[in-house]
Each structure stands twice: as C-alpha cells, then as structure tokens.
Image (cartoon, grey):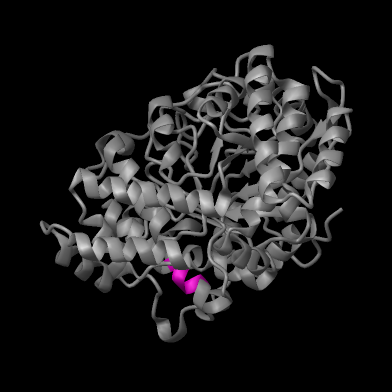
Amino acid sequence: MADCTSIRKFSDAADYRARFVVQAEIDKYLPRGRHFVDDARINSIIAGIDGKSADPVRVREIIAKSESTCETLQPEDTAVLMQVTDPALFEEMRAAADRIKRKVYDNRIVMFAPLYMSNLCVNGCRYCGFREGNSAQKRRVLTMDELKEEIDVVAGRIGHKRLIAVYGEHPTTSTEYIAETIETCYARQVPAPRSGCKVGIRRVNVNAAPLPIADLKVLRSVGIGTFQVFQETYNRKLYEQMHPAWSVKGNYDWRTTCFHRCMEAGVDDVGLGVLYGLCDWRYELLATVMHARDLERWFNIGPHTLSFPRLEPASGTRVPEESPWLIDDDTFARILVIARLSVPYTGMIVTARESPESRNRVLNHGMTQLDCSSNIAIKGYSDFASEAHQEKERQQFMLGDTRSIDEMVRYLATRGIITSFCTAGYRCGRTGGCIMDALKTGREGKFCKINAVLTFREWLDDFASDETRKIGEALIEKELAGIKEWLPKFYTTVMKQYEATCRGERDLFF
C-alpha cells in the first residue's frame, strides 16, 4: 500500500478549498512573478497575423526545421503556420505532420480507455456537468469493489491494457483514494473471453486536479503513468470568468505550474490539454507552445502528450452551446497539424468526444492515441450492457464516437495502422528525459513497433471477432516482414517472443 503519511488531510470541502494550495510551490516557478504564458506577447502575435497570408517560403522553412530537429517551435513560427489558408500549402503541412508522426511513432495508434472514478467536485466551472451546485448531476464515488467490476469489463471483456483514470476534485477523492484505485487497477486479473489467458490493466494514467509535490510523490510510488491536467483555457481573464475565485480551480497559477511540480516530484510524463471552444484557438495553441517550452527550459523535458478536447454539451449548463469560440471540423484538423509541427516529439490524443467522421479524417494529421468502447458515466461500464449507452446526468459531457474497440481496430487495420496496447516503455524506465531523445531520433518508434505487434497479437487472440482477427493477422504479416528488413539480426529474437505470445504467454516485451 502507498505511504500517505506525508500528505495533508482535510475535514470537508470548505477546509480543502481554504488550505490545499501551497503558494511556495507556485512562486518557485514564476520568478519575479512573471508567468511563462505571456499574454501580451500572444496578443501581439495574433494581431500581427490577423488578415495576413503566410509567405510560402517561410512556411516551408518552418516545416523543414520541424522535421529535421524535432524541437519545439518558437510561438512566432507557430503563428506563421496559422496564417496558411492556401489548400495546397496546408496539404504540404499535413503531409509533413504525418511524416513526423511516423518518424517518431511509426504507423501505430495507441489505444486506451477512460475510467471515471468519481464526480464529486469542490469547483464551480461554468461549462462542466461535474461542477458543485449542479443538482442535475447524479453523484457517485466508486468503491474498490465497484472499481473491480469496472476493470472486469474494461480489461476482461473489452481488452484494454491502458486507462486514463479521471477524478473530480474533492477531499473524498484525495491522493490516498487515487493511490488506492491505481493499486486496485493493477492488481485485478481476469480471464480473456476467447483464450482464457489472464489479462489486466498494465498502465494507469491519471487525469486529476493539480497536486502538491508530496502528493505527487505518493502517486509516483504506486506506479502512476502520465499525469494529465487540462488547463481548459490559458487566457487568464476568461479563465477567471469560467472558474469562480472561491474555488481551488480558480487559482490560475496553481494550475499552470502543476507540471513543474510533477517534474520535481519525479512524475516525468505529463499531459497538457486545453478545452477548444472556450477561447480563440490561436491563443490556446500559442500558449500551449509556451508551456511546453518552459517545461523544457526548467527540466529539458517537454509534454509526453497533448490532448485536444472540444467543448461538448453537459448537464446543467448552456456554455457549450453558447460560446462564441466553438470550432468546426476544418479548424480542428488545422489545429492538429499545427500542433504536430510545433511540438514534433509529443504524443497527440484525440478522444471519443469527436464524431467518427472527425476522428477518421485526422488519423493522418499527426495523432497517436485514441480511446474507444468508451463509457464516461460513473460505473458506466459494468452498469450498462452496451458501451454505447450514455446518460447525461451521470457523465461530464456527451461522447460523439461510440464505436466498439473491435470495429475501431478493424477500421485502423484497413488503413494500414496497427493498434498498439503496449505499455512496456514505461515499465522499462523509458520515460521523461530517457525517452525524449529516443522519440526525437525515431529510435523509440522502432522499439514500440515490435511491442505493438506482440500486444496486437495478444488482443486478436484474446478478444477479436473472426472478421477483425483475419484482417489483423494480414497486417501483422506485413509488420513482421518490415521488422525483418530493418532489424535482420534481431528478427530471430523477435520471432521467439511472437511465437511464445501465439502459444498463450502474455506481457512479453522489449
């Protein structure tokens, strides 16, 4: 069990709000009170590009720099890419984004599932169904027995290996609770429906509120994966309008410095994200680049992932329908391409908030991760017979893509994309600074391709329909041939692991 003796305890929500923020852990990373998200610089950049077309020569120079160095761009370079309106020039950007993705991550798409642990919250975010005071929301916190039932479905019936565990911010779901849920997820093993092999969750990423350093060290001790905290909006004025000052989340500086504390605590895989649709997307993307660059400046480690959630309808609020900054599918696709060129090494997550059409469209726009067979109601997986079932009053927002994992895996395979359930790199210590250089040079993608094949073989044997298995096996043959070509001396070793996997051994990796 996790040692939680170093973390503070809170008697109720009011006590939590009053005492949770540690000001000294903010000030350290904002020297002289200067914030790394430079509002004046962003507004000046946007004013400078409004109504102006991009110089194609300059755009191609930036594309070439992004491809050759895999380093984060300057915000001014990102802004040049935002000026592109010519379809042919944008297609050059998209093609480059796809090449970079393939260099860094190969032709893999990593699969995961969201699992919501609680919807109690001390905050009052105007756009969110979980906010305190929303009487329409049905509140619940999973017990450990209920969590086991969820894992039995997510890992044992659907076949996921990787979770993003999501928590409301509340003293009931403290760091001690988060640590216990992580340990419970890892401990649960169930038989797969087709093979009978024991399967379970191998990586638990966490989406939760910003935490102090002591709490983050506790989560590190129980094997947390990536720690996600979405900024929602980097525009401080709008942030203050959306997040009441009486709430913990109303502290802009506490939230924006969370990943600096993560790095200090040894949680070196972090995931940035903003809620596109609350503010001008150009502002948000420029601020994201500034955030990534500041992490690199302090720790030489950038974000492991960027996420691109769009504002979606939620219970008890009209903000998602009334925001003047909602974006269409064309703009969403542009954002992904510009983000891939701007932060070339990072993973890019497009969730089931999106429609099937939107996600299908952007598969070659630089994205690397997606979820499917998702249910975001509290205890939704085990309560509902169909993963596509949704209840607005039990979830944070409404999903757009309710395709099953079998359908999605099959679709990806028809497009030459291998679904990866691999978690090996994290358990081998290839995280944070250890992985950054490997990602930028493409070495990590080659390792991950081998492990993707092994985990894909597992999933086909344990869960796939006959139709999906047939299509998947044809793709595996092609992938093995490719491995033999670029790693001929290692191929025999790879095949030994592959054949052992076919015989029913599980969790073999390099």
Give the residues drawn in magenta, as a range.
291-295
- Asked whether 214 or 111 is in front, the reply is 111
Q: Is 480 displayed left or right of 281 in the figure?
A: right
- Asked whether 174 or 401 is in front, the reply is 401
- Asked whether 161 or 492 is in front, the reply is 492
**In the rendered structure, does residue 294 fall within the stretch colored magenta?**
yes
Residue at figure coordinates x 88%, y 28% from the top left: 504
* Prevailing secondary structure of the magenta residues: helix
Residue at figure coordinates x 64%, y 69% from the top left: 433
Residue 432 to residue 460: above or below = below
Number of marks in picture: 0
Rendering coords of residue 68 (x, y %): 44, 65
Q: Is 366 displayed left or right of 380 in the figure?
A: left
Rendering coords of residue 251 (x, y %): 45, 64
Residue 346 to residue 308: above or below = below
| Residue 310 visible, this angle | yes
**In the rendered structure, does residue 455 fall within the stretch colored magenta?**
no
Rendering coords of residue 473 (x, y %): 69, 24
